[in-house]
Amino acid sequence: MPTLETLLVFAALSLGLALTPGPNMLYLVSRSLAQGTGAGMVSLIGCQVGSLAIMLCAAAGITAALLAVPYAWDVLRLGGAAYLGFLAWQCLRPGGQPIFAPRPMPREPAARLFAVGFATAALNPKVALFYMAVLPPFLDPARGNAFAQAALLGAVQIAICTAFDALLVWGAAGTARFLGTRPGWMAVQRWVLGAALGLLAVKLATESHSP
């Protein structure tokens, strides 16, 4: 199983990514504003089930690669470092984060809310890239089954995103108003997250461990 340090670092990274506006956040807040908290929560469940499906598929693929391909850990580690570096640049480049502006949406039945939430997460390339590029470097085959480690870390990320997104749904109106009228807060958030992602990218790229 992963060490406590690994879990804490991965949890911190997951929280940082959860704080960054993206398709899931925009959809959940927009849906909550348009149809209420209940609709937002149904949409949230759909989003997280979609993320769970992607995470389990990624964990299975990562495990197969580690077992079958020589130097797979190093390839995944460097790929993860490159992806984190790209995310850091996206945060730090001028105009890298658009202003948070959810749009009104028509009312929809619960089944459709769940389905659209599922599709929003499952078809979001950032979700798959996170699991395929960021998750592998946190795995240590010497500490047990790689799939179990990947599933545990993925569960940590999903739990953090679920908790944060639930808070967004419950406070949708205040969240949209706060983020939409305070570009300075968004700039600070971008720089802090960008610096953290950049440092983690360097750490992963310079690690020498290999299974």
Image (cartoon, helix red, strand yellow):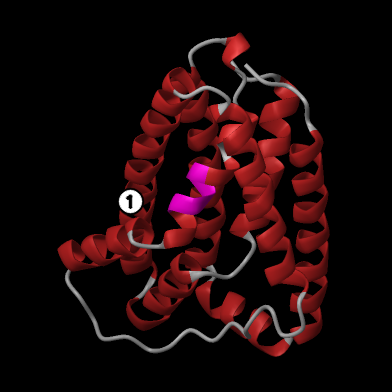
Q: Quadrant of residue 93?
A: bottom right
Q: Nearer the viewer, residue 16 or 166?
A: 16
Q: Amino acid at mark 1?
A: Gly
Q: Which residues are magenta?
A: 128-132
Residue positioned 25% across, 60% down in the render = 114
Q: Quadrant of residue 141?
A: top right
Residue 176, image x, y percentages = 57, 81
Residue positioned 38% across, 33% down in the render = 61
Residue 21, image x, y percentages = 58, 70
Residue 42 makes an appearance in the image: no
Residue 200, image x, y percentages = 77, 45
Side (left or right) of 180 relative to 72: right
Is residue 172 positioned above or below 192 on the image? below
Residue 7 makes an appearance in the image: yes
Disc 1 crowd rating (10 Å Cα; few below 14, some 14-19, many 20+) is many
Q: What quarter of the picture does the N terminus occupy? A: top right
Which residue, given by chain and number where applicable, does mark 1 sit on? 50
Determine if the magenta segment contains residue 117: no
Residue positioned 32% across, 78% down in the render = 35
Q: Nearer the viewer, residue 109 or 79?
A: 79
Residue positioned 26% across, 86% down in the render = 106
Task: Look at the magenta stretch and give its main secondary structure.
Answer: helix
Side (left or right) of 198 relative to 21: right
Residue 27, image x, y percentages = 41, 73
